[in-house]
Image (cartoon, rainbow, N blue to C red):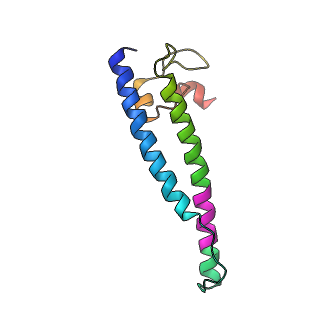
Amino acid sequence: MNAKEREQFKATILKKITQTEREIQELEELIQPISPENSIGRVSRMDAINNKSVAEAALRTSRKKLASLKFALTKTESPDFGLCVVCKNPIPVARLLIMPESTRCVRCADR
C-alpha cells in the first residue's frame, strides 16, 4: 500500500468517524427516559419503550464502530495496515473503502 492510498484511507476513516459521532449524538437524544407523567396512552408508551430499546442497541453498535474506526486510524501508518489479521493476505481496497475498520478479508470474516 502506497502513501497516497494510506492518505485516502485516513480521509475516509476521519469522515466516517465524524458521521458516527453525529449518529451517536442523535441516538443519545432518542434514548432519554420516558416520563411516566407524560399522558401518551398505554400503547403509545409501549411503542416509545420499544423504540428506545432499538435506539439503545443502535447506540451500542455505533459506539463499537467508533472505537474500531479510531483504532484503524492509529494503524494506517503501520506496515500491516490493510492485511488480514488471520491469513495475512491483503484486504481488498474496495472493502477497506467501505469498511475501513475491517481487520479481516471477506473469506476470513465469514468464518
Does the magenta portion include 51?
yes
Measuring 40% from the left and 31% from the top, which residue is drawn there? Answer: 97
Quarter of the picture holding the C terminus: top right
Q: Main secondary structure of the magenta part?
A: helix
Does the magenta portion include 12?
no
Q: Is residue 58 above or below residue 72?
A: below
Q: In this view, does 87 lie above or below 22?
A: above
Measuring 50% from the left and 55% from the top, which residue is drawn there? Answer: 25
The percent coordinates of residue 34 (x first, y second) are 63, 73
Quarter of the picture holding the N terminus: top left
The percent coordinates of residue 36 (x first, y second) are 67, 80
Rendered image quadrant of residue 42: bottom right
Locate residue 18 relative to residue 24 in the image: left or right.
left
Q: Is residue 46 above or below residue 105?
A: below
Locate residue 65 relative to residue 33 in the image: left or right.
left
Q: Is residue 107 above or below residue 36?
A: above
Rendered image quadrant of residue 55: bottom right
Rendered image quadrant of residue 48: bottom right
**Residue toward you, 90 or 60:** 60
Range of magenta residues: 48-56
Measuring 61% from the left and 57% from the top, which residue is drawn there? Answer: 56
| Count of marks, rendered view | 0
Measuring 64% from the left and 75% from the top, which residue is drawn there? Answer: 46
The percent coordinates of residue 37 (x first, y second) are 65, 84
